[in-house]
Amino acid sequence: MASVTRHRLNKRLLRAGHLIGLFVAMTVICLPGLWVVLNSFRPTVEIMAKPPVWIPNDLNLDHYRAMFGGAGEGGVPVWTYFRNSLIVSVTSTLIALLVGMAGGYAFARCRFKRKSTAFVVLMASRAVPGVALSLPLFIIFGRTGIIDTHFGLILVYVAMNVPFTIWLIDGFFRQVPRELAEAAEIDGCTRWQAFWKVEFPVARAGIASAGIFAFLTSWNEYALASQLTRSVTSKTMPVGLLDFTSQFTLNWGGMCALAVLMILPALVLTFIVQKHLIAGLTFGGVKG
Amino acid sequence: MARFASASVLAIVAAGSAAAQDQFAGTTIEAKLIGGQQYEALYSRIADWEAATGGKVSIISQKNHFELDKEYKADIAAGTVGWCVGSNHSSFASQYPTLFTDLTPLVPAETVGEFVPGNIAAATLDGRLVMLPRAQFDVSALYYQKSLYEDAGKAKAFAAKYGYDLAVPETWAQVRDQAEFFAAPPNFYGTQFAGKDEAIVGRFYELLVAEGGTFLNEDGSPAFNSPEGAKALQWFVDLYKAGAVPPGTTNYLWDDLGNGFASGTVALNLDWPGWSGFFNDPKSSKVAGNVGVAPAPKGGAGVRSGWSGFHGFSVTETCPDKEAAASLVAFLTNEDSQKLEAAAGPLPSRTAVWDHVIAQAKDDPYRSEVLAAFQETAATAFAVPPTPYWIEATNLVYPELQAAILGDKTAEQALADASDAVDELMQENGVY
Amino acid sequence: MTRVKLPPWLVLLLPAFIIIAAVVLVPLLLSLYSSFTPYHLTRPDTLWKVNFPFNYQKALTDANFWAAFGRTVLLLTVALNLEMLLGLGLALMVSKVTQGQRLLRTAMMFPMMFSPILVGFQFKFIFNDNVGLVNNALQSLGLADRAIPWLVDGNLALFAIICAEVWTSTSVFAILILAGLYAIPQDPLEAAKVDGCSPWQSFRFVTLPFLMPFIYIAMAIRSLDVARAYDIVQVMTNGGPARRTELLWTLIGRTGYVDARMGYANAMGYVAILLSIAFTVYFFLKLQRARRDLGMGD
């Protein structure tokens, strides 16, 4: 009897610990981000106050109003940056997913010589830091006239994301038993049909998460974009953040306001893609 | 305003020798202009130039100065220099000796004569006038909290401790005493300084000059490892050791300093003119209404510190239509342009516009105080050493200065190491 | 006319290889060449002088370079392991929740929405010694009576950078490990329960081996993604003060772009690339072994 109560107590303690742990973890994760959101609504004098103002007593939209205002009043071409970011990120993510699916499938399913070497070479290409690439890229792009264009950035981001995508998707294809596809082929499917009907749904989780990663990487990339873009025709939002800095000043409140506009779409997209992620994930879980 | 604009158009037309409004019709000037709130108001005047000359301006890059600097270097490397007009800065200009053309044959001498002579001198490298300064002249003066000097108790305690009366400091030694006196960490600090990158080297450089030293010898070899250098560096070390500056100051750049003084936690702050409005605006600053401004203090040699720089516009060597480009540059730096920019707070670089802004400010005591302090400091201001290796040298020097300030090395050791590094840099580049 | 028929794996991989060759390989060869020259950005003619092996000699005999090298390895090791452990814990906790998981997962990925450059500014302000969030909180709660110089003290500055780095990247680990947790077959877990394994035992001997490939994938991906750390560190401390937080990337970036000494920067870059590749190959080998153990690899 006693042991049963203790068992129950243990269970309850465990659950309480779990909830507390989760709460603490989520607080740590969300606080620094929410702090940025909060700052976008506060006047600079309150953000930088000493002694600190813990309970905001003056929330307003001044930073947003200034940001959408004209040149010279703190205005920033927000919509143009937004459009550039969107075009570049979405296109490069879609292309990277297609290329990555093909590559991931090849690695998971085909047998060929030097497979490991090919794989490592692909991955190692991601290890090359942006700093080492940016200047030669700039020179090549400058000579071929694709500097400061969407196309140039998309090309770079596809190359940046393909190794990731291949790796992730390869891992998920491996989780699908080869027999499953073979069975479908015996049932009269072509290889192509077997892929779309059997393997693709199972690997959808991998593709969805690869997609999120690729999108977020492109959406947030700064180091290369700052080199390869120059004017409003292609500047993306992370580069636009630097519009709030000048030689002597940094408008942190304004920066936060632009940051919020940057985070929102990414957050919404992640939330939507979650659904597919869950479907794919559970399917894979049942089938393993 | 319109009358002024048309008058200046006439001046340009006369200078350019062509007669009509469509002097540059069909010409498109590609320009790379510095971005940022403080600088962009001027660009609204580009439309006026377009209307007056028939030329067109296409802004192909708009970034802050450090990014623009990287872009210019990459442009030189890639050979993508087909554009015409670029923003420039006196501290950066010597790095691109081949990029920008000499403006002397393109701009009438009397126009050049209307600028502050010191600025033109700093814009002239190896006898070539590489840019025309806009109304963004920068030199630092001393901002302080006025209330600290109106407190009888503080005045008495200070006089008892240091043996002289508490007044707004006129020398760097007084700044040190007062900063140590006012400091009450962690809620209040005596002063602060920019602690990294070119910024700390610039501050060290101006103190060095104020102590009577020089940074580089005539031949380009380092000269800062001297008794004057040691004295200048010791000033930073002492303040840091005494806890009179925020402990994070070695990671501060200009924005941290400005926000720090505006937060009301710093007594004395050597800072740029661009902040004067910010500090006295209750929406952005807690010390609004309590801000005093004095000329930069003097060092041991009786010389005022005055590291200065300014923004300007240059024309590239490869520009296909230099006449048109120079006309745009002259327009953006003419009297009306400078009046427009200076109205928002920045300091002009034309003699007549200085007089104009001072006359304008006569009913505004704070603005008058600001202008008086900066004008006094500007009179003896000096630019960075005219070597293409200035920025590179600062990158070698600043970690050593930081090491001394943080106590990793003695001031002498740090200066010796920095001097060796700069010496190696100069030799590697074949300077001597 | 004979049509050459490419093997299917090559057809599938060709697009990936072409794009990567264009964007990575060609520029890399260019920068390899320039690392043999005294190439200075503002003096293009210096590109045609070869001074091999001067740059490499200079880099390899420079104490600052090796200090940055060691610090980079240290930072990578500490940050990666910390992120892995925290990510594993987070994923386990989230996977046990039955309600509101979708919201929780999105919240878990919240830091991934932040551009590294923004994270740099954000943590610079959070760790500011005078008006920063951390010091203000500590002082308001009475836990500290002095301003702690987070970004100045050697150890604290590295700690602050690791905080920023861990904050942004733990989500990556958590989401991948979570995906792995869902992919675990239920049968062995139930079998373990029937056999009387404790929760810890079934975690240790059933769950963890299945998770290992996912963990190594995450590790390798993160070890590659050093560019993120560059943006963050550059904004937070730019390697300073007094080189206390200098990493290879900040050193290279400054030498290459601010000092314009691209030849020398690229030489250092190559040493750094070798380091990254070593990390990648290491995790890849680990991944292969983990897969072999599970009977998934070939």
Image (cartoon, rainbow, N blue to C red):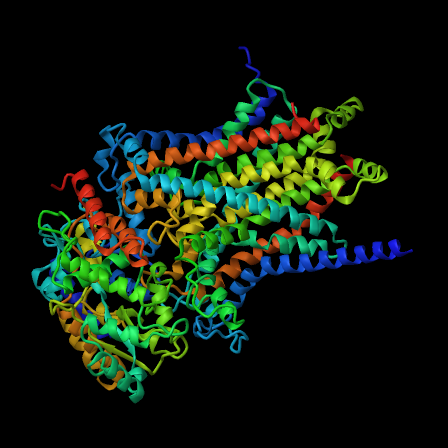
Up-down relation of residue B217 to residue A39 (above or below): above
Give the x, y percent position of residue B250.
34, 59
Give the x, y percent position of residue A203.
69, 36
Up-down relation of residue C52 to residue B192 (above or below): above
Q: Is residue C143 left or right of residue B183?
A: right
Q: Is residue B228 left or right of residue C237?
A: left
* Visible residue check, residue A134: no
Give the x, y percent position of residue B278.
35, 74
Give the x, y percent position of residue A39.
50, 67
Which quarter of the rendering shows the C terminus of chain B? top left
Up-down relation of residue A109 to residue B338 (above or below): above
Task: Determine which quarter of the picture holds residue B192.
Answer: bottom left
Q: Residue furthest top?
A: C1
Which quarter of the rendering shows the N terminus of chain B? bottom left
Q: Residue at the location (56% across, 51% down)?
A: C112
Q: Nearer the viewer, residue C30 or A13?
A: A13
Q: Nearer the viewer, residue B336 or A129?
A: A129
Q: Residue at the location (77% across, 44% down)?
A: C199
Up-down relation of residue C274 to residue C67 (above or below): above
Task: Determine which quarter of the picture holds residue A73.
Answer: bottom left
* Visible residue check, residue B134: yes
Q: Nearer the viewer, residue C79 or A148?
A: C79
Q: Is residue B343 left or right of residue C4?
A: left
Task: Determine which quarter of the picture holds residue B114.
Answer: bottom left
Number of numbered markers: 0
